[in-house]
Image: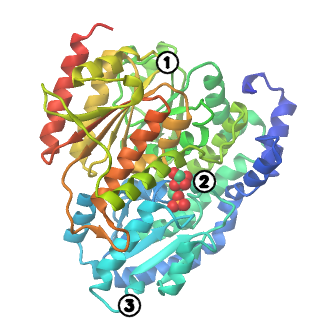
Amino acid sequence: MFVRPSKLSESEKSLILHRLWEKDASLWSGDEEVQKAISNRLGWLDLPEAMAKSIDEIRSFSEEVKEEFEAVCLLGMGGSSLFALTLSKIFGPQPGYPYFFVLDTTDPEEVAKLEDDFDLKKVLFLVASKSGTTIEVVSLFKYFWGRLEGLMDQPGGNFAAITDPGTPLAKTAEERKFRRLFLAPPDVGGRFSALSYFGLVPAGLMGLDLERLLKAAQEMATVCGPEVPWEYNPAAKLAEYIGENFILERDKLTILADPLIRPYGLWIEQLVAESTGKTGIGVVPIVGEAPGSPTVYGPDRFFVNLGLEGRRDIYGRLLSELKQNEFPLVNHWWEDRYEIGAECFRWEMATALVGYFMDINPFDEPDVIRAKRKTAEILKLFKETGDFGVEFGLDDRTGHAFITSRILGDTPSLKLAIRKFFLSLSPWSYVAFLAYLPYDAELEEFFTDLRTMVRTRRQCSTMFGFGPRYLHSSGQLHKGGPKTGSFFIFTRRGRKEEQMVPGEGYTLWDLQFAQAYGDFQALSDLERQVIHIHLGEDYRKELEDFAAFLKETIELAEF
Ligand SMILES: O=P(O)(O)OC[C@H]1O[C@](O)(CO)[C@@H](O)[C@@H]1O
């Protein structure tokens, strides 16, 4: 049963805070098995204090790496990479420290770019995976290990790992003599691990001030403590805001952000989507949309604005228009970028409390497995037959190769598919564009424009994700959350034999396609609307054509 936070008495609120800080798993479930699992997921509450003792160790490792390497490349997905990614984007390269980047993709062009741009012997690969079994991470590790094996005798010196004790990755790190192995606390889940080794080792390697980052987190943890009255407790207030809106049927948590801290939205998106998007409900985080005038927003929206002190006027006009139009809005003003440490704690605790209000377990991700299973089946078939088992139809008019999910039925033309797709959208719908393409600012801009076009014409919310990154973020919500999502998936042709993953019998191209098609199948089985477009090698041009066609089709249709 939902709990409406605004209806709680002071003593009930205080009790909830005490139970949370006492790590009382019965807050989220009456089932003993689930409680046992949750008890092993609450270690993040202690991290701001507990990690202080690891600062020296991380710093000395960073100094060592700084002397020997030109670049650090983190191989990881979801909770094991997104905080590092946002730090690297928000802070940028620090003088004297190696160039730091995150490879959270199987996109072959992205991998090739890294090989072209760097001397691999001068790159430290930081393999970050809580489970040590995530397919993208394992494949990338094998790929780069294979490359380095051909270049040097002891590749282990170019690898470090962060993982839980006893995982296959921990074993590999020991056997292959990795430069360093950081064992993470097992009672911290992936998306709650920003303030553990998963976030702090990358921060150290980037040359950031770890004391400052943790101090901000400690201060936030203190003001979110059990004795602090609810109305002064930043996490409780944020949780009440989200929970209350959700219960009042506003489920699109729209994040506006100052461009200087905008990448943080990616981290929030994963935390909120994977934690709350399950059992057919969810808070849908809308991140990275271009800000619009109030008329483009539907009744399902509520807003959090992330801003920096000294730059409060960035969205001044929009914020006051939203207020005037009675959209719920809160502002989080950061003193400076290091507030990010504090914000992680605030959002983690708020998300845990929102889970309580929504009567769900915010610490699992039960539906991610659906796409993983499909991908494994597709790869198996591919290895046995050399075929992915999919036949794209060719649209007569546009020449695009496409398939549609089961619920869209037989759709001989792309135009008909698009019309059906948009016809069944409601004011509570969201449309997600999922692109298994290289990371590229131009492509991001292209999809931002596409989102704006769809939002303007249909007044629905929009999401965007690069695949396979989104599988470990909003992917849980797409499948396990409300049935209001409709999806466009984009892949491209271009298989190249030479990007083989050693010992696996597939190339990076095959893996990436199997992941996309696996998610298509999982969404299709769950009766979601999906149009999967398989672009040609000149995919940028084809995308432009597709956007024009989509616009024309939506404009001509009467909804
Ligand atoms: O750290 P791991 O085990 O590689 O997992 C990566 C990500 O995959 C998920 O388990 C599922 O998408 C996330 O929750 C997690 O952050």
State which tag comes first along the sequence, 2 or 3: 3
Viewer-nearest of discs 3 and 1? 3
* In this view, 208 is above or below 543: below
Indicate the quadrant containing the C terminus: top left, top right, bottom left or bottom right: top left
Image position of 16 with respect to 45: above or below: above
- The type of colouring in the image is rainbow
Q: Secondary structure at mark 3?
A: loop
- Closest to the observer: 461 or 174? 174
The mark found on residue 226 in the picture is: none
Residue 322 in which image quadrant: top left
Q: Is residue 155 visible?
A: yes
Residue in view at x 21 percent, y 44 percent = 442
Residue drawn at 73 percent across, 26 percent down: 2
Local SS, label 1: helix
Query: Residue 408: horizontal and vertical position, in percent?
Result: 37, 23
Q: Which residue is mark 1?
A: 323
Q: Which residue occupies 65% across, 22% down?
A: 247
- The x, y position of residue 500, in whole percent, is 28, 68
The residue sitting at the top extreme is 558
- Relative to 338, 550 lies left or right: left
User: Tag 1 or tag 3, which sits nearer the N-term?
Assistant: 3
Residue at 24 percent across and 41 percent down: it is: 534
* Residue 64 point in image, percent of width and height: 44, 84
Q: Which residue is mark 3?
A: 154
Residue highlighted by disc 2: 192
Residue type (three-letter) at the residue carrying disc 1: Lys
